[in-house]
Image (tube, grey):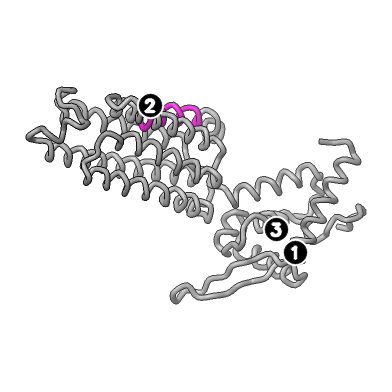
Amino acid sequence: MNQTISPTEELKRIREMMEASSKFISLSGLSGMAVGLCAMAGALVAHWVLLDGGQVHYDEYLNTLGRGASVRWALVADALVVLVAALVSAWYLSYRKARKLGLAFWTPSARRMVVSLMVVLGTGGMFCLIMLFQGYFKLVAASMLIFYGLALLHASKYSKHDIASLAYVEISLGLLAAVLLNYGLLLWTVGFGLVHVVYGVVMYWKYDRVSA
Amino acid sequence: MVNLIDGLNKHFDNRVRLGMMSALMVNDSLEFNVLKELLGVTDGNLASHVKALEAAGLVSVVKQFVGRKPNTSFVMTDEGRRQFEAHLAALEKLLRASGGK
């Protein structure tokens, strides 16, 4: 225990401990991919099953369509299934990664990250539901992307910095979706689906491959 | 065991104690079990190092009940923070003197 360690190694050890105790580093690249695939599957269901392959426009037309209300609730249910599937798979894969590396999973920093994520995400979720109740569908896809991006940005200080870049991409896509209203579902799919898969692959190559 | 270099603190010449102080520098307080997992040590090992740091007045132990379960956590004292910062400064000085990186 009292082996003489060089000052360089000692500083390295100090840095590692500071990071491991204050940052949530178990988030796995695979979970990014899984979240993305869930979102894409959900978007496909929304597009082909619920909106008849684009025959039904999901935006303001829903108000006047006879089956508008049922489509609306089917879309909400679809979104909720995607949310639960994404959360469960991200949780499970990160848990597995922590186990494999012999790290503690539910650390104080993991707790802080989840709380800071949920505060913003919960606000955004409620805001989107309120918009649905008020009949403003146009900006729901954009709002989801923007709030998700802000939530990630807020939570990124408790995890790897890379999450901040993911946050900026989501916020930009959200703003774009607010401008290009008819591409809302498409941009939503890109933001929650494609971007997550790409992010997951990059993270997997950057961190997990070496440690796995 | 004896550190010839001025400013280096012998309380921190052990990996477990060094890791514990590093973790406490960036966290307001840490629970026994969290610290144990973080450092990868046994209960007894951690307890003996805690005792040493507590005796030196560098950390303080907070015992409380969460529901009916006893819960032990640690916080760094002001003196602990001062000494750890001095230790870091000494390490830096040493590195600069040796020209290493």
Crowding around mark 2 (Cα neighbors within 10 Å: few <14, some 14 to 19, many 20+) is some
Furthest toward the left, the residue is: A66
Earlier along the polypeptide chain: callout 1 or callout 3?
3
Q: Residue at x 26, y 39 (%)?
A: A79
Same-subunit check for callouts 1 and 2:
no
Q: Position of residue B4 (x, y in %)?
A: 92, 54
| Residue, disc 2 | A194
Q: Chain of mark 1?
A: B
Q: Would you say the residues marked 1 and 2 are in contact, meaning their CB atoms lie under 8 Å apart? A: no
Q: Position of residue A163 (x, y in %)?
A: 51, 37
Q: CA distance from mark 1 to mark 3?
A: 8 Å
Image: magenta residue range: A191-204
Q: Nearer the viewer, mark 2 or mark 3?
A: 2
Judged from the image, the secondary structure of the residue bearing numbered disc 1 is helix
| Residue, disc 1 | B80
Tell me if residue A208 comes above or below residue B26 in the rendering. above
Q: Would you say the residues marked 2 and 3 are in contact, meaning their CB atoms lie under 8 Å apart? A: no
Q: Of A130 and A163, which appears nearest the observer?
A: A130
Q: Residue B100 is drawn in which quadrant?
A: top right
**Numbered mark located on residue B62 in the image:** none
| Residue, disc 3 | B21
Judged from the image, the secondary structure of the residue bearing numbered disc 2 is helix
Q: Residue at x 88, y 36 (%)?
A: B99
Instruction: Say left or right for A113 vs B95.
Output: left
Tell me if residue B10 comes above or below residue A162 in the rendering. below
Q: Main secondary structure of the magenta part?
A: helix
Instruction: Say left or right for B99 vs A12.
Output: right
Same-subunit check for callouts 1 and 3:
yes
Q: Residue at x 46, y 34 (%)?
A: A29
Q: CA distance from mark 1 to mark 2?
A: 48 Å
> In the rendered structure, which amino acid carries the disc numbered 2?
Leu
